Image: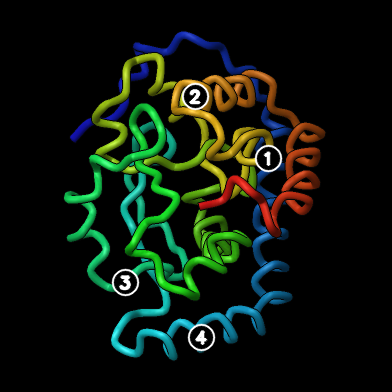
Amino acid sequence: MNYFDKNTTIIKINDSKFYLLSKRIIDIFGAACGIILLSFLFIIIGILIKIEDPKGKIFFSQKRVGLNGRVFKMYKFRSMVSNAEEKLEELLKYNEVSGAMFKMKDDPRITKVGKFIRKTSIDELPQLFNVLKGDMSLVGPRPPLPREVAEYTDYDKQRLLVTPGCTGLWQVSARNSVGFAEMVELDLQYIQNRSFLFDMKIICKTFFVLFGSKNAF
């Protein structure tokens, strides 16, 4: 399936070669350092996940749509029951955000450990491996699901003009407190104005909202 048509581009992007190169260098260095420094935390979280649900996997991979509509596997710590995808269909009617996303504050599929690692965003840490592979950047729009992109308008698809990120302007500004349309506007604002300093500002703000964000679910 073709998720992206470059002919539908509306906004203009003026990324310099220096910015793109420096961004990639920072991504590789930042992701590598993060994996090394947080390796002990990875082990602890993995043990806790296995204790609660021995039959389930520690990591969860899911197809996401990235730069120019390319599909890749995004990694997370598993925060839901093993058959979460099968249970999704019956829960779609309880969606608590507007547009092409699914969010449910009291999602019954989430495990006890899952609630904690989601609240603190620890479940997102394995995405550092996606950054090393080049599928994602440290900063960029949230990578959407294929079923979400299937509902995108041409305007919404402009989110796919850049490499998706682990964190971004939407995540540090509003996260789940706004609907899909507002998220798109924040992402497009980032895409049009992104720079080395803007990325550093978002990374710094991420540390302040990483633990205990009231909008995380």
Q: Give above or below for 20 relative to 186.
A: below
- Tell me the distance, in whole angstroms, between the alpha carbons under discs 4 and 1: 28 Å
Choose the circle earlier in sequence order: 4 or 3.
Answer: 4
- Tell me the distance, in whole angstroms, between the alpha carbons under discs 3 and 2: 30 Å
Check disc 4 and report its element: helix, strand or loop.
helix
Choose the circle earlier in sequence order: 2 or 4.
Answer: 4
Choose the circle earlier in sequence order: 3 or 2.
Answer: 3
Of badges 3 and 2, nearer the viewer stands 3
Which residue is painted at 46% across and 8% down in the image? 10
Amino acid at the residue labelled 3: Val
Q: Which mark is residue 184?
A: 2
- Tell me the distance, in whole angstroms, between the alpha carbons under discs 2 and 1: 14 Å
Which residue is painted at 56% across and 27% down in the image? 187
- Tell me the distance, in whole angstroms, between the alpha carbons under discs 3 and 1: 28 Å
Which residue is painted at 41% across and 79% down in the image? 58
Q: Residue under label 3, please give it.
A: 81
Bin the neighbour count of mark 4 within 10 Å (Cα to Cα): few under 14, some 14-19, many 20 and up: some
Q: Position of residue 198 (x, y in %)?
A: 77, 32
Q: Residue under label 1, please give it.
A: 172
Q: Position of residue 82 (x, y in %)?
A: 28, 73
Q: Which mark is residue 48?
A: 4
Front position in the image: 37 or 51: 51
Amino acid at the residue labelled 4: Leu
Q: Which mark is residue 113?
A: none
